[in-house]
Amino acid sequence: MAEKTKDHAQHYDNGAFSKPHKPCRTCTDFQSWMKAQPNPKGKSRTVGLDVTELEQKNHDCPLDKDELGRNTWSFLHTMAAYFPEKPSIKQQTDMKSLINIFSNFYPCEYCASDLRTDMKDYPPDTSGQKELSLWFCKIHNKVNKKLGKPEFDCDKVDERWKDGWKDGSCG
């Protein structure tokens, strides 16, 4: 059975890990994925390189689980930040549809399944920009908590994803 770490793709089923699975690139961080790949004789591995070297060597490669997650959360939070303050019924319905469809096609099936489960317990709130931003923040924090990562202060979503930090560091 593959060793589970907070950096490795994890899937929870009622609080327990699911059965071991063959690692896929979008479900696994790069180094764990590389370790699981066959190592042809005489070929060097990139495992052991620091993060900067990995990013430089793999900037044009398919995204791994961590890169996909960061980019996806950036997109979703930014989309929520620019959602209308007072959306029409159609805009609300369309956003709920987008989130539901997204949860069916996200490339990491374990992550997608986990999101669908969370959405059953805590459906998307598309009643306005602040509500949607808060919903994404809470869902993101649920994921962060499961992965042992720090939670984000949801009072700061507009600073982080729309207006920029109050200290002016975003220019």
Image: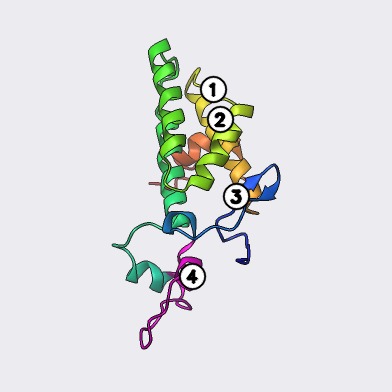
Q: Which dot marks residue 36?
A: 4
**What is the three-letter code of the residue carrying label 2?**
Trp
Q: Report, in whole angstroms, how far the alpha carbon at label 4 lies from the one at label 2.
A: 35 Å
Residue 61 at what x, y percent from top left? 32, 62
Farthest residue toward the top? 89
Farthest residue toward the bottom? 42
**What is the three-letter code of the residue carrying label 1?**
Asp
The mark nearer the N terminus, 4 or 1, is 4
Up the image or down, 145 lies above or below 40; here it is above
Up the image or down, 94 lies above or below 106; here it is above
Q: Which of marks 4 and 1 is in front?
A: 4
Name the one closer to the observer, 171 or 115.
115
Q: Report, in whole angstroms, how far the alpha carbon at label 1 lies from the one at label 2.
A: 6 Å
**Proximity of marks 1 and 2: CB atoms separated by less than 8 Å:** yes
Is 31 inside the magenta-drawn segment? Answer: yes
Q: Which dot marks residue 125?
A: 1
Residue drawn at 41 percent across, 39 percent down: 105
Q: Mark 2 points at which residue?
A: 135
- Secondary element at tag 4: helix
Q: Mark 3 points at which residue?
A: 11
Residue drawn at 61 percent across, 42 percent down: 141
